[in-house]
Image (tube, grey):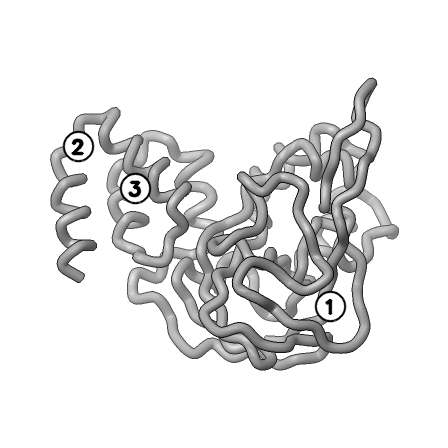
Amino acid sequence: MKLVSVNVSHPREVAHGRKMVRTGIFKEPVAGRIVLRGLNLDGDGQADLVNHGGLHRAAYVYPVENYEYWSRELDRDDLSFGQFGENFTVEGMTEEDVHIGDVFRVGDALVEVSQPRPPCFKLGIKMAMPGFPKLFLASGRVGFYLRVLEEGEVGEGDEIERVRRDPERLTVRETSHLLFLEGQDLKGARRALRVPALSPGWRESFEERLVTAGDDDLGTTKRGEESG
């Protein structure tokens, strides 16, 4: 596994229909080494701090293997690193191979996978395709966010080492499909809630599903988390 590119940007105003919106999705590769901190990378910024950045979404990761898929699917040859708004373009870390709660050493930093990426309309702006977020979500090639356990310098070419696999083995792709495409799956929701590293927002969504269904196991799940 390898860090292929580190990409950052400051938020900027872009046209969206008849109005302007502020977004930090236009990431560009940077040379040299920069520090990954608890909230984000040095030199990076987010316009929407409710849905991007912060403790549970400090960096967004996207596998380089997906670039080939989208190039074929969209018949495009203009996709460059940072295209999908990712901070880290990586090799060997596809959504089928990475689990929520896995811990990795990248450069001098230690990180933990916290959630898949839910696409928003700004990805459609970046791709010049308003309908792209739906294609992105359906594909399962959504990438994932990281929580920073130890801050440190990172840079292009760094080897990435998995130092812990979460015992639940719930992959990024399974988690994304479970929330967005399998809305009646209560067993899957209970499984997701057994992963301590799952970000609070996603945890609340799965808890709400169980509450709505009148699932009696939700209290048991919470008690198990507290005792653990």
Which of labels 3 and 1 is toward the front?
A: 1
> Circle 3 is placed at which residue position?
189
> Circle 2 is placed at which residue position?
215
Q: Are marks 3 and 2 in contact (CB under 8 Å)?
A: yes
Which residue: 48% across, 56% down?
Answer: 55
Amino acid type at circle 2 is Asp
Residue 128 % position (x, y): 81, 35
The crowd level at tag 2 (other Cα within 10 Å; few <14, some 14-19, many 20+) is some
Image quarter in which the N terminus is found = bottom right
Quadrant position of residue 109: bottom right
Q: Tell me the element at label 2.
A: loop
Check the image and report above or below for 218 versus 145: above
CA distance for labels 1 and 2: 44 Å
Q: In the current view of this chain or complex, which residue is farthest to the top?
A: 18
Residue 175 % position (x, y): 42, 48
CA distance for labels 3 and 2: 11 Å
> Circle 1 is placed at which residue position?
5
Which residue: 58% across, 45% down?
Answer: 52
Residue 117 % position (x, y): 55, 47
Can the viewer see residue 72? Answer: no
